[in-house]
């Protein structure tokens, strides 16, 4: 499973990579990302990074980050993010697309 995921993330299409990212945040697998799920994932990432981040993150940083981004992705303002909304948002942001392409060379 791990190698399959690694292959998809490193060599898959942009669509496959976005589906993987979506699945990472969709903790209960219902096809929707709630703000709570996004905060849980971002908090976990911040915990893994520890104090090595700049600027330093604190316990409210994850929630603040999610608040800033969630409303940008949730275009219909229904309180959840769908795969379609994520794809649409990422497609409009050249930095995100470049980051997804970077995975090809990093891994």
Image: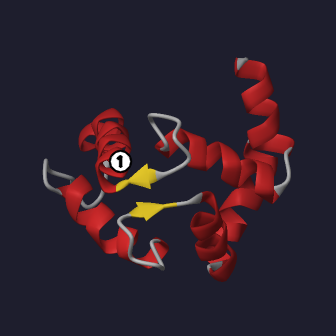
As drawn, is 55 to the left or to the right of 37? Answer: left
Q: How many marks?
A: 1
Q: Residue at x 35, y 65 (%)?
A: 79
Q: Residue at x 71, y 68 (%)?
A: 98
Q: Residue furthest left?
A: 59
Along the line of sight, which residue is nearer the eye, 71 or 97? Answer: 71
SS type, badge 1 = helix
Along the line of sight, which residue is nearer the eye, 11 or 51? Answer: 11
As drawn, is 76 to the left or to the right of 36? Answer: right
Residue 56 figure quarter: bottom left
Along the line of sight, which residue is nearer the eye, 47 or 1? Answer: 1
Q: Residue at x 69, y 75 (%)?
A: 91
Q: Is residue 9 above or below residue 97?
A: above
Q: Residue furthest top?
A: 1
Q: Residue at x 29, y 64 (%)?
A: 65
As drawn, is 8 to the left or to the right of 66? Answer: right
Along the line of sight, which residue is nearer the eye, 68 or 74? Answer: 74
- Identify the image quadrant of the N terminus: top right
- Identify the image quadrant of the C terminus: top right
Expressed as whole percent of the image width and height from the top left, the position of residue 95 reads: 62, 74
Q: How is the image coloured?
A: secondary structure
Mark 1 lies on residue: 42
Expressed as whole percent of the image width and height from the top left, the position of residue 23 reads: 58, 41
Expressed as whole percent of the image width and height from the top left, the position of residue 86 reads: 58, 65
Expressed as whole percent of the image width and height from the top left, the position of residue 96 reads: 62, 68
Q: Is residue 12 above or below residue 71?
A: above
Label 1 packing within 10 angstroms: few (<14), some (14-19), many (20+): some
């Amino acid at each position: 499973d791990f190698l399959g995921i690694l292959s998809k993330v490193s060599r898959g299409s942009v669509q496959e990579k976005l589906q993987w990212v979506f699945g990472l945040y969709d903790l209960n697998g219902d096809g929707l990302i709630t703000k709570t799920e996004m905060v849980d994932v971002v908090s976990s990432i911040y915990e893994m990074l520890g104090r090595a981040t700049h600027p330093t993150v604190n316990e409210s940083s994850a929630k603040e980050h999610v608040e800033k981004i969630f409303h940008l992705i949730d275009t219909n303002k229904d309180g959840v993010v769908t795969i379609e909304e994520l794809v649409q948002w990422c497609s409009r942001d050249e930095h995100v697309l470049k980051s997804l392409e970077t995975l090809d060379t990093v891994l």
